[in-house]
Image (cartoon, rainbow, N blue to C red):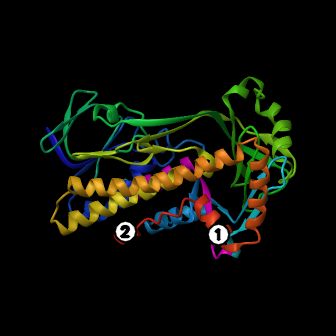
Amino acid sequence: MERYELVIVGGGMAGLTLTALLQPALDRGLTTALIDPAPQPSSGAPGSPSFDDRATALSGQTLDVLQRLGLSELNSVVSDILEIEVSDHGHLGYHHMRAAEQQFDRYGAVIANRSLGSLLWQHTQALPVDWRFGQSVSKARPINDGIELTLADGHQIHAGLLVLCDGGRSSLTEQLGLQAQTVDFNAVARIATVETTLPHQGKAFERFTQQGPIALLPFGDFSALVWTAPKATQSTWPSTPEDAIPLLEAQFGQRLGRVRRIGDWQQYPLIERTLSQPVGHHFIALGNTAATLHPVAGQGFNLALRGVQRFADLINRTHDEGAGQLPSFQELTTLAETIQGDQDLTAGFSRQLISLFGSANPLLQIGRGLGLNSLDRHPSLSRLFALNSMGLLAAAPVSQGS
C-alpha cells in the first residue's frame, strides 16, 4: 500500500490552489498525492469540470493571495471591478460605490474559470506531488493512523491526513460520517455572457427584482450575467437567450445601453449546502465540499480560498516546527471552527440580502430603499457594505511562505 502524509481529493480550483499554497511544506518533503477523476490538465485544457467557461468573481484579498503565489499573468486575464451599483427594481433604493473613494485600487476582478485553471496548473505542475488524474476514490475508511483509500481500480492508498476538495461530488463525506445541512432557495440561476451597446468600464451591477437578484459583472469586452428566479416561474421564463433580451432589459434597464446578445446559458438550482462538522480524525473538508453558498454576493471561491489558505498555513507551520509532523486533531478542530465562523458570516450576509430584497412587504421595501440611499451619505457604512459584499469582514491570515 502506498503511503502519503497528505492526500488531496479534488483537482479543481480549491485543490490546485491548496497545492500551490503548500509549496513550503512540499519543498521540505511533505509527501502528497492529489487524486481527481478528470483528465490531467494541459496548457490548453485545465481538465477539471470546475474550469469551464463560467466567470468567477475574485475579491481584492483573493487577488493578493494569487499574486503572492506567483501567478504573474493574472492581471492580463482578469477584468477589474472599479465600481459597484446596487439598485432595487421598481423602488427608489440605489447605492453607488467607487473603489477609489474607499481607498481600494479595485473591489476585485472577474476571471474565466478556464483561465484561472490554466494559471494554477502552470504554477503547480512542477511541484513534488504525485498527480493522480483520471482516478477516483471509491471508498474511504478511517484506520488508527490515517485514512485507507480504495481507488476505483482497486488500488489502496494510505493517507496520514485526507483533504476533501471535490466539491461534494463524491460520496466520501457520507462515508466518513459528515452530515450536510441544506437550504433549498427554490430558485435557479441562469449564467451567461451578455453583450451590450455600452462598455462596462469596470462597473458591476447588483439589481434586486421581485423575482430575484440579477448580477452583471465586467468580463472582458462583455458582462457576466447571473440571473436568478424562483423555480415556480421557470415555465414562464423565455426558453432561448434571444427571447430573454426584452425581459432582461425590462428588469435591468439600460444601464449599459441596449442588450445586443445573451450567450448560451447554463442553469443551476440554488441550494446552500454546509457540513455541520467538516473535520474528523485524519480528515477535513474544505472549499465547496464544506460550504456551497447562494451566488447573490459572489463569494463562493473567495470563501473557499480563505479556508484553504488557513489550512495551508497550519500545515506549513506544523510541518516546519514539528520536524515533519501533521496537525493534531485538536488543531484541525480549532481550524474548522475558525473556517465555519467565516462561512456563517458570509452565508448570513447572503441570506439577509435575499430576505430583505426578496420581500414584498411594503414597509421593508421602503426601509431598504432608505437604507440603500443613506449609504451614499455615510462613507463608513458604504465601506462596511462593500467589505461585506466582498466577504472580507473575516480577515484571513497572510501566508508568508510563498
Name the side, left or right, on which 364 lies relative to 51: right
Residue 109, position as x, y percentages in the image:
62, 60
| 169 left or right, relative to 229 | left
Query: Is 188 placed left or right of 375 in the picture?
Result: left
Q: Is residue 349 left or right of residue 148?
A: right
| Tally of marks | 2
Say what amino acid the circle numbered 1 marks.
Answer: Arg
Point 80% across, 52% down: residue: 366
SS at circle 1? helix
Which tag, 2 or 1, sits closer to the chain's start? 1
Q: Amino acid at mark 2?
A: Ser
The residues bearing labels 2 and 1 have C-alpha atoms spaced at a distance of 30 Å
Report the magenta residues as a range.
Answer: 102-123
Q: Residue at x 49, y 50 (%)?
A: 117
Identify which residue, 353 or 160, lies in the foreground: 353
- Comparing 147 with 383, the one in front is 383
Q: Which mark is residue 383?
A: 1
Picture quarter with the C terminus: bottom left
